[in-house]
Image (cartoon, helix red, strand yellow):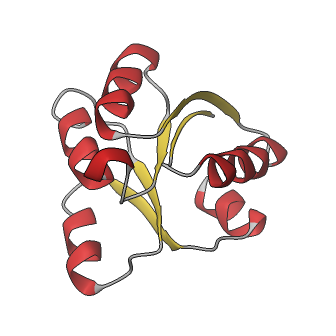
């Protein structure tokens, strides 16, 4: 599977990329904020997007997914430290494959990508 990975924390991006690749998938792009994520999604057309919710410059992963999904039906796996009901309900308004709460394990990411 071709995956776009979006997280504002460089270390977390590195670890999640390692988890994804160990599960046999390809990370085709990395982004740290909303505008960059939308641009890469439209350019690279990944199979799925692994998306953090709070991004660089106060941007938002759910908002990014809503913009992306206006033109493409790419599902999201959200990985966030924010698991309150309001956040989850907002994420459910997108094509959401899974919602994982940080910190995540390699196994959790691998299972969500099946």
- Nearer to the camera, 71 or 32: 32
- Nearer to the camera, 111 or 12: 12
Quadrant housing the N terminus: top right
47 shown above or below 61: above
Is residue 5 toward the left or the right of residue 38 in the image? right
Residue 106 is situated, as x and y percent measured from the top left of the image, at 76, 63
Name which residue lies at 33% across and 20% down. 42
- Nearer to the camera, 2 or 54: 54
100 shown above or below 97: below
Is residue 88 toward the left or the right of residue 4 in the image? left
Quadrant housing the C terminus: bottom right
Residue 91 can be seen, yes or no:
yes
Name which residue lies at 47% across and 74% down. 81
Question: Residue 36: which quarter of the image?
Answer: top left
Residue 107 is situated, as x and y percent measured from the top left of the image, at 76, 67
Which residue in the rendered view is the most extreme toward the front?
57
Name which residue lies at 48% across and 40% down. 48
Residue 53 is situated, as x and y percent measured from the top left of the image, at 36, 59
Give the number of marks: 0
Question: Residue 66: which quarter of the image?
Answer: top left
Which residue in the rendered view is the most extreme toward the top?
43
Residue 18 is situated, as x and y percent measured from the top left of the image, at 78, 46
85 shown above or below 8: below
Is residue 22 toward the left or the right of residue 8 in the image? right
């Amino acid at each position: 599977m071709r995956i776009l990975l979006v997280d504002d924390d460089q270390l977390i991006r590195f670890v999640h990329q390692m988890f994804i690749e160990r599960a046999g998938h390809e990370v085709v792009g990395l982004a740290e904020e909303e505008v960059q994520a939308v641009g890469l999604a439209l350019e690279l057309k990944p199979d799925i997007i692994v998306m953090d919710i709070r991004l660089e410059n106060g941007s938002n992963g759910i908002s990014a997914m809503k913009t992306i999904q206006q033109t493409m039906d790419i599902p999201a796996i959200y990985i966030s430290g924010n698991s309150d009901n309001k956040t989850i309900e907002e994420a459910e308004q997108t094509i959401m494959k899974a919602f994982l709460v940080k910190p995540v394990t390699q196994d959790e990411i691998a299972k969500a990508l099946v």
